[in-house]
Amino acid sequence: MRDATASRGRNPEGTAPLIPLASVDLAQWQSLSDRASEPNGYYLPGWELAVSASAHGRTGADALCAFDASNRLTGLMPVVSLWRAWKIPLPTLVSAHPYGTLCSPPLDRAAAGDAATQLLDQARQAGAHALILRDVALDGAAMTAINASLAREGLSSQVLTSYTRAALDATQDSETLLRAGLGGKKLKELRRQRHRLESHGVVAFEIARTPRDIGAALETFLPLEASGWKGKRGTALVQNAGDAAFIRRAVPALAETGQCEIIMLRAGATPVAAGIVLRHQTRAFFFKLGIDERFAKYSPGVLLTLELTRHLCADPAIASADSTASADHPMINPIWRGRLAIGDVLIPLRRNDPTVALIHAALVARGFALGLARRAVRLLRK
């Protein structure tokens, strides 16, 4: 049988098909990010390495890698075992979930098909019978390349769950978009709220970009996020030592390459809302939002998002923005009217493999159990 990697290159000699994510060459990874077929701020090296090193429940990820004939990295897929992800003891690799709901793997745009095929080969060599890609862009370039590679082998992926979330077309005029999305009446009401907020001081929109400025802005953002409902639920970043260590490493690292900024709305000297925004290629990613609940009646999160919309639409380097929000997010859905299709995808690695049916059945059972648990929690709360 012909060597499947003969024309595409292979992992460097002595490299296992599955390696620790932290051992991936940083310069190679950064170069691949620049050449990636689709943007994903959450798999940038400065971000995902910080997640893998410190973030609660997300540390110690591994990686599948693809290389060309000159040993240049052309594909990267951070992964964990199915047992690690969901305590299911079946031979499956699952996307390592970054802090952020997008796991589309970076593939070299000039060699995406070969890179996808090689990643599937590496997963097989690692002993996996299937891959599960969580939160991937279903219509993105990475899934297109993976599906084409599967089709050449007589295989096909299966979408397990899917939803659409808000996105911004930043090539359009911001005021036209906001008027179309919110309507004149709602915009007038928000202008009134902003004027009332000015009773606490001049309202100003600020952007921190440099490593020095962004470090100080982050220390303003963290307690702001913890002061609201996230703090009450115990999910604010600063409330877990590992999560706090991750974000304090990741944000300055991305600022060094111009791929992160912190936006802030102030009333006088008081920060009333702040957000973390990642940037990769021509896309922005709205990662986190924190507000001071004392000013909730002024809708500071909405006011900040309006300013972010204007900021991104005015930036010629940005063509789109991913809200990375839930499907039914009540704040951003009316403002950003574009939609991205996101889903979890099961990828079989062998034809007519009965293990894949077991994997699928286990995932269905898990989903059913989680659904029952959520309904029980809702009933108890009532």
Image (cartoon, rainbow, N blue to C red):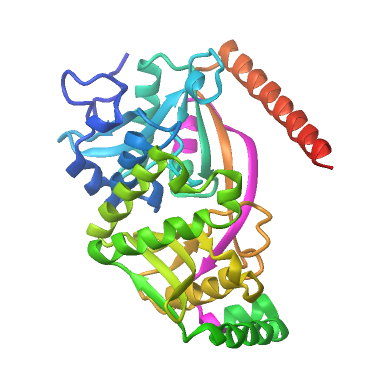
The answer to whether residue 26 is left or right of residue 120 is left
**Which image quadrant: the N terminus?**
top left
Give percent across and percent down for residue 338.
59, 65
**Residue beneath the point at 57% across and 68% down:** 301
In the rendered image, residue 152 lying in the magenta stretch gets the answer: yes
**Residue beneath the point at 38% across and 31% down:** 59
Residue 36 vs residue 10, the one in the foreground:
36
> Is residue 2 visible in this depiction of the protein?
yes
Residue 52 vs residue 222, the one in the foreground:
222
> Is residue 152 visible in this depiction of the protein?
no
* Image quarter of residue 86: top right
Give percent across and percent down for residue 283.
41, 61
Q: Above or below — where is 257 with respect to 91?
A: below
User: In the rendered structure, which segment of residues is drawn in magenta?
Assistant: 146-175
Q: Above or below — where is 7 with respect to 269?
A: above
The answer to whether residue 268 is left or right of residue 26 is right
**Residue beneath the point at 67% across and 19% down:** 361
* Image quarter of residue 213: bottom left
Q: Above or below — where is 217 with respect to 270?
A: above
In the rendered image, residue 341 lying in the magenta stretch gets the answer: no
Give percent across and percent down for residue 367.
69, 28
**Which image quadrant: the C terminus?**
top right
The answer to whether residue 330 is left or right of residue 139 is right
Question: Total label count?
Answer: 0
Give percent across and percent down for residue 71.
17, 34
